[in-house]
Amino acid sequence: MSAHGIERALLRAVIATAVACALASCGKDNSPPQQQAEVKPYVVPKQFDRELNDSELDSLQRMRQTHRVTRDEYWDGYGGVLANDELEVWYPDGKVNALQGMAMLKLAAEARARVQKVFGTVPSERVVIICAPDIDLYVAQTGRQWWHYSRIVGDTISIQPPINLHTRGLLTIVGPREYYEWAIIKLSKGRAPRWVQEGFASHLAREAPVLEDLRQDFGTVEMSTRDMDSALERESDRQATRRAYYNAYRTVEEIVKAHGEDAMARFVLALGENDDQDAASRSAFGEDYDQVVEAGRGWARGAQ
């Protein structure tokens, strides 16, 4: 097969069917396997399948320059890709969907800049962000449910359709948040507890208003970090998972108030150097891990 033929075949797998093959080959998944739903054919909405107007083209051109886009390709019937040296975003069929792809690239680039500021470094790997064309394909090809924003496997982030997230008022939170979570996993070499991964990503993304709104989904609030990790590893029950997200974010917020955001970042980096949680905690916070956690969970005593 020619190089062009190989690339078109890859596009068919990656874009038209939301990249089931890419997910299967990218490393350890953070969520349990689930039975996949039947994949429905994706039909491009007419409003997304037209030539871009002058204002849209002008915005794309300015963002191409700002974010140093070195690859910008589109194939009718398959979709497109936008990439620079650090980020690669695949978007589905429909010329106007380039705007969704560029929005994701912009948000990830801004998140990358904040990771550099907070941690003093960024992962060296290039992250690939795959934007699903619709919720049905996202669910079918990731094994995730509609209430999960994304699936992170290795250096690939498969995310819900950006247009869906935008209409729900979530895009500017979810876009950066998933990059933050990926970066925390990479910088800690996967050693950060799940509650730290999720809670610190929520903190960096300023996800508090969303998580507070979700409190109506669950009853009793308090969870131990062990229970948080257990629920976050399974991510099978919506109420339990959202309760764990909320607990993780509140615990991290309390630790950041006591020790500072830079100390939380040092803890993540220390875990990347040493899998001893107590040693990493003493290095970052000056206290053993259990002491930091117990103080961090102090918010829960008045939250019942």
Image: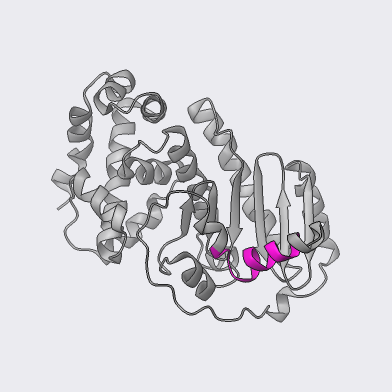
Q: Which secondary structure is most common in the magenta stretch?
A: helix
Q: Is the N terminus in the top left, top right, bottom left or bottom right quadrant?
A: bottom right
Q: In this rendered view, identify the residue nearer to me: 278 or 274.
A: 274
Corner quadrant of residue 40 = bottom right
- The magenta region covers 7-20
**Residue 34 is a magenta residue:** no
As displayed, is residue 299 above or below residue 267? below
The answer to which quarter of the image holds residue 197 is: top left
Q: Position of residue 261 (x, y in %)?
A: 40, 30
Q: Position of residue 65 (x, y in %)?
A: 79, 43
Q: Image point 41% across, 33% down: which residue?
A: 188
Q: Position of residue 127 (x, y in %)?
A: 59, 45
Residue depicted at x 49% and y 39%: 183
Above or below: residue 288 compared with residue 246:
above
Query: In this image, 154 relative to 80: left or right?
Result: left
Q: Residue at 55% across / 51% down in the picture?
A: 156
In this orientation, which residue lies closer to the viewer: 94 or 36? 36
Pick the residue in front: 104 or 41.
41
